Structures are given as C-alpha cells and as structure tokens.
Image (cartoon, coloured by chain):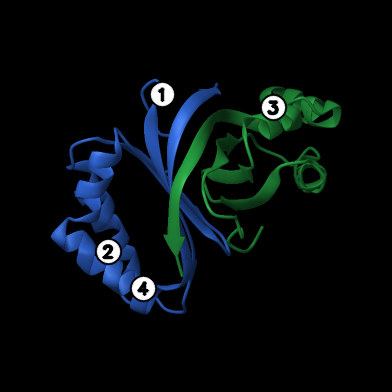
Chain colours: A blue, B green
Amino acid sequence: MSVIADTPAPPYYAVIFTSTRTEGDRAYVETSARMIELAEQHDGYLGIESAREELGITVSYWKDLTSIKAWKANAEHIEAQKNGRSVWYDTFKIRIAKVERDYGV
Amino acid sequence: MSVIADTPAPPYYAVIFTSTRTEGDRAYVETSARMIELAEQHDGYLGIESAREELGITVSYWKDLTSIKAWKANAEHIEAQKNGRSVWYDTFKIRIAKVERDYGV
C-alpha cells in the first residue's frame, strides 16, 4: 500500500473509498490487511493505494464493473462491510469511477 | 480537506493524484494550500479529499472534463505543476476518472 499502483493502460475502474474512523482499533488494522489479501486474489484486481490522516482514502483498481461486483459480494468482505458500517467508520463514501486517462512519472 | 467531499449526484469527474514526496518542504505545504484556494475558485470545482502517509492521495472532484482542463491550464497551477515534477514529488500518477455511482453514510 506504500507505493503507487502499477495499473495497466486505461480504461479500468477505481473504487474511491473515503472514510473517517471511530475511536479504537477493534480489529480494524487486522481486518484491513486481510481484505487487501483477499482482494488481491480476486479476478480483475489491479492494485490498491491507501493513506490516512484525519481522513482515510483507499483507492482500489479493478478491470471492470463485474470484478467490483464480485469483490463486493465476497462473503468475508460482506462481514467486514457490516463491521465497517457499525463499528469502524464514523462516516464513509464510496465512489465507483471509470478511469479514462492516466499519466505520471 | 479533513472531511468527505459533499459532491452532487453522479456523473461527475474525479482526478486521483497519487504521489510520493522528496525530502524537505521547500514551500510545498504553502503551495498546496494555495492550489486548493485557487481550485475552489474555478468553475466546475466540486470538492477535494486528501491524506498522506508514505503515499499521498489527493482526489479532487469536478463537474466535467472541460473544468478539469481549465484548472490544469491555470497559470499559477502550471508553475506548481513544474515544481511538482522537479522539486516536490519523487513519483506521481494522475488518473482522470468518471464517477458513475456513489453511496455511503
């Protein structure tokens, strides 16, 4: 998570997950690591980038909407999503976006 | 920058800017704040979210590609982009993405 994701040429998809945390870990760090491990095994996963200060931003990259949908429906991920809503996150927003162009050094 | 951006209903655009910094401030913090101030004055600006650990992620939201193009061409912003490449950033990637769907609490 500490490097820029090595994504292929566009088009591909980004899931922009922005959140503010509640107090206390309550297995958050462990579950976050597990979710990345799980996501990496999913078809269509292209990479992930993450940073948190007051606001947390995690952007995961996917081949298409089908692969995002399959990841969202993963049973262990569904459990984590429930805990996200009820335990870990004070507020959050998820944006599904189609990357049309990219550049950089 | 410490809260989730209050964006309108999709579609709209996201500019996902991911970077790793070089050492030393060299007017980086001051320029970053000025760029947000400038961006906010631009037509089509919808909001910004930012966090940095080892990796920095800034996502700015825009009405359409035209407004992103106009912001990229802002004279003061062009100067900052030059310093970004030559002074502040070790590596960076910019992704232009169309937000198709969003949800959250």
Mark 3 and mark 2 residues within 8 Å of each other at the beta carbon:
no
A90 with respect to B13 (left or right): left
Task: Name the residue beneath numbered marker 2.
Answer: A31
Image height check: is A86 above or below A102?
below
> What residue does disc 4 label?
A85
Same chain assignment for discs 2 and 1: yes
- The image quadrant of residue B92 is top right
For the residues beneath circles 4 and 1, the answer to whether they share a chain is yes
- Which one is in front in this view, the residue at disc 2 or the one at disc 1? 1
What's the chain of the residue with tag 3?
B
Residue designated by label 3: B69
Mark 4 belongs to which amino acid?
A: Arg
The tag earlier along the polypeptide, 4 or 1, is 1
Query: Disc 4 or disc 3, which is closer to the eye?
Result: 3
Mark nearest the camera among 2 and 4 is 4
Query: Do the CB atoms of the residues marked 2 and 4 lie less than 8 Å apart?
Result: no
- Please state, as top left, top right, bottom left or bottom right, where the N terminus of chain A lies in the image: top left
In the picture, the disc for residue A10 is: 1
Amino acid on which the number 1 mark rests in the picture: Pro
Left or right: B61 in relation to A46: right
x, y percent for residue B27? 81, 40
Q: Residues within 10 Å of mark 1 (few under 14, many from 20)?
A: some
Q: Chain of mark 2?
A: A
Query: Is the Cβ of the residue at disc 2 closer than 8 Å to that at disc 1?
Result: no
Of pointers 2 and 1, the one earlier in the residue sequence:
1
Residue B90 position by quadrant: top right
Q: Secondary structure at mark 2?
A: helix
Residue at 17%, 62% in the rendered image: A76
Amino acid type, label 3: Lys
Quarter placement of the C terminus of chain A: top right
* Residue A32 percent coordinates (x, y): 31, 59
**Callouts 3 and 2 in the same chain:** no
